[in-house]
Amino acid sequence: MRFIPVWPVLLCALCVSALSLSSAISVAPPSAQAASNHLHSYLGFDRNDYPGDAAMLLLRKDFSFTGYWLSPPPGEKSNSWRGKHEFLRLHGFGFLPLYLGPDSAQWKDSTSAAKQGTLDAKNASDSASAEGFPNGTIIFLDIEEGGRLTPNYHAYLKALSYEFTRRAMKPGVYCSGMPVKESHGVTISTADDIRGDPYTHDFTFWIYNDACPPSPGCAFLQEPPAPSNGGISFASVWQFAQSPHRKQFTARCPAKFAQDGNCYAPSDSSHQWFLDLNSATSADPSTAPQWPEPK
């Protein structure tokens, strides 16, 4: 038997493999790499009261972004977050700027609702600018009502969106992504209701759905859940855990809350600052475009 050296064959095979790999890399469309980058989610938190500068530095170890009130939170007359934007920005935080929305029962008609929408957008924009947020910031209106909104509330949102745009800010909304049963077997979420209005189609959505599933509970995962996993495909931010937890929705959560019913960060070993957990498609949801693209 004639001896045939093995190394030329191996060398040839390696060359072919290298060429194949190079070709595979070169022909991959740029959109494929961009899509893979978008698959990453970021973890953030929100709470009504500012926990203090020292606490925020500690919480920065666990979170990429934080909620930031531009108005007094629900049930409060003052806002403890005021004046903290620059400090938090310098320490690497992204933001979810929040402005408290009204109660629909206060309006008699769509005209008064629209006037309130214009006024609230002005006040929210002025507050954001005074805090140092730049033009183009997404401001999230906090809507505490669930299910389908009234026609007056839609008139309010239409005026709010127009005035935000006129003042070089972008409209966003924090609302329920949880389905509510209506008559004749119809279900609706507040997010779907707002999304279906052509006058509010440009809103960025921060939805809450703390029911398990789809929520993982008070979970600090290496890869936070994608916002679209919260049941609303067009959501940019998903609040998946609240403090205190709502027992009727969290009984089957795989990640449990503390004994007092609240959620605490791993860095907060003494359980001083209860908070809500959020995932987002960006480390700074106040400036990020919507993703995934609305359907």
Image: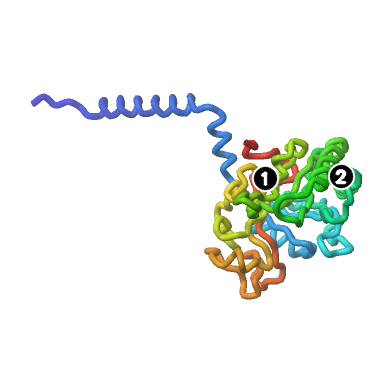
What is the x, y in percent for residue 193?
Answer: 70, 45
Q: Residue 192 carries which label?
A: 1
Q: Which amino acid does label 2 sit on?
A: Ser
What is the x, y in percent for residue 154?
Answer: 79, 44
Q: Which mark is residue 110?
A: 2
Q: Dot 1, crowdedness within 10 Å: few (<14), some or many (≥20)?
A: many
Q: Determine whether label 1 and label 2 are within 8 Å by CB.
A: no
* Farthest-out residue, left: 1
The answer to whether residue 92 shows anywhere in this view is no
Q: On the image, which quarter does residue 168 sit in?
A: top right
Query: Vertically, is 104 above or below 197?
Result: below
What is the x, y in percent for residue 47?
Answer: 74, 61
How many circles with numbers are drawn on the protein? 2
Q: Residue 148 carries which label?
A: none
What is the x, y in percent for residue 267?
Answer: 64, 65
* Mark 1 to mark 2 CA distance (whole Å): 21 Å
Camera-side residue of 199 and 238: 199
Q: Which colour scheme is used?
A: rainbow
